[in-house]
Image (cartoon, rainbow, N blue to C red):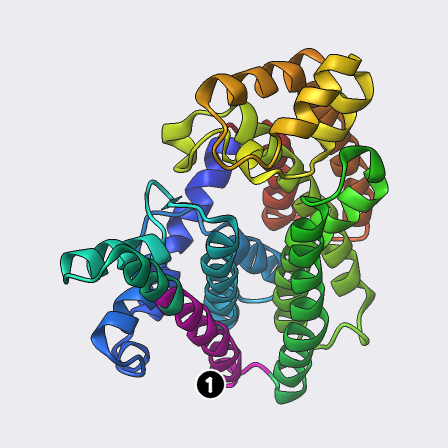
Amino acid sequence: MVTSEEFMVALKQREPLIREILNREHYQKSFRPNSLRQAVYSYLNRPAKRLRPGILLFCCGAVGGREEKALLAAAAVEVYHTWTLVHDDIIDNDSKRRGLPTVHEEFRQAALAWGYPEVEAAQLGRDIAILTGDLQHAWSVRLLLDSCELGVPLPVVFDLIRRLEDDLTNGLVAGEALDVLFAKKKISELSEEEILEMLELKTGILYEFAAEAGASIGLGQTIAENPLIGSLGRFTRQCGTAFQLQDDTLGIIGNEQLLGKTVGSDIREGKRTTIVLHAYQNASAAERQFLEQTLGKAAASEQEVERVRRILIDNDGIEYTYKLAETIVNNALQDLASIPDSKYKELLLTWAKYVIKRDF
């Protein structure tokens, strides 16, 4: 079995290949003016694990394909994921991403240095970030189209683009909308099923697409032509959902320096998670009232955030969510049974364990 250390090494070995593609001169030159080019590359050139591209490449190998053929698609998935982060950071008013300023914050600070008033600087930062995400979304489609140059059959490329722009984008934006709408609802009005559906759409379906893209390219077939593609998609969709559950726990108890974002920001944003729901159901009347009053309070003090954290932890929200993620991953493993044994399958199995064991 591949160890978690070997899994991380496998990701690191592929990361420079993705970075090289993204920084090719003909791609860089297509972004104008210089400030917008800088914004497009802001997150892409920061240190990152490149999990989604890695999963795509591993799934390509797991069905007997050559990874080199899937490199442009892997880069496309990374760029697609990045535009969602840029826009998500605007929605959540986050100021940090991977330990550095978010795009809208980076350009807000730049605008202040250029002499803009605060309100105008904040508006310029948001405008640049919205345009950045739009460009990255379009770039991901171009990268998939360019996969034809690596010998990926046109029917496969067209099928991937159709599903990217239809199934994936519609589902992912629906998940983001649910996340925003749920934050305005009372905790008692939500069910665990609704929260899990939202997480599946926000996170799980992008992993599903990455797996299916890798497998489709590896086999040279569309998802309708080979059941192995769907099996890998179901496996990664479930693991991606569990990944988000673990992300939610780290947002409450994680190490801020390792995470690269502010621990407790989910509390101020009012995120409705399984942690919140389960703790709320177990909490005293006074604790429930405090959760309702404080979750989503942007100006909540450190003391208020800390009290919410204690309520969530003491009422087993963290422990319950961890076990839920573990159950989802164990169920997901059934979909790997039809995949032939190989080093790539072992990498995917190790990733499934990493999803719930990671600490950043």
Amino acid tagged 1: Glu
Q: Is residue 191 above or below residue 308?
A: below
Quarter of the rendering containing residue 113: bottom left
- Chief secondary structure of the magenta portion: helix
Residue 339 visible in the picture: yes
Write the start and end of the magenta stretch as one range. Answer: 128-152
Q: Is residue 98 above or below residue 57?
A: above
Viewer-proximal residue among 70 and 124: 124
Of the 4 image quadrants, the one containing the N terminus is top right
Quarter of the rendering containing residue 353: top right
Residue 90 highlighted magenta (yes or no): no
Residue 146 highlighted magenta (yes or no): yes
> Residue 16 in the image: x percent, y percent?
33, 57
Badge 1 density bin: few <14, some 14–19, many ≥20, Cα 10 Å = few
Q: Is residue 77 above or below residue 249?
A: below
Secondary structure type for disc 1: helix
Q: Is residue 197 above or below residue 351?
A: below
Q: How many marks?
A: 1
Point 39% across, 63% down: residue:
126
Label 1, on which residue?
149
Point 62% across, 88% down: residue:
154
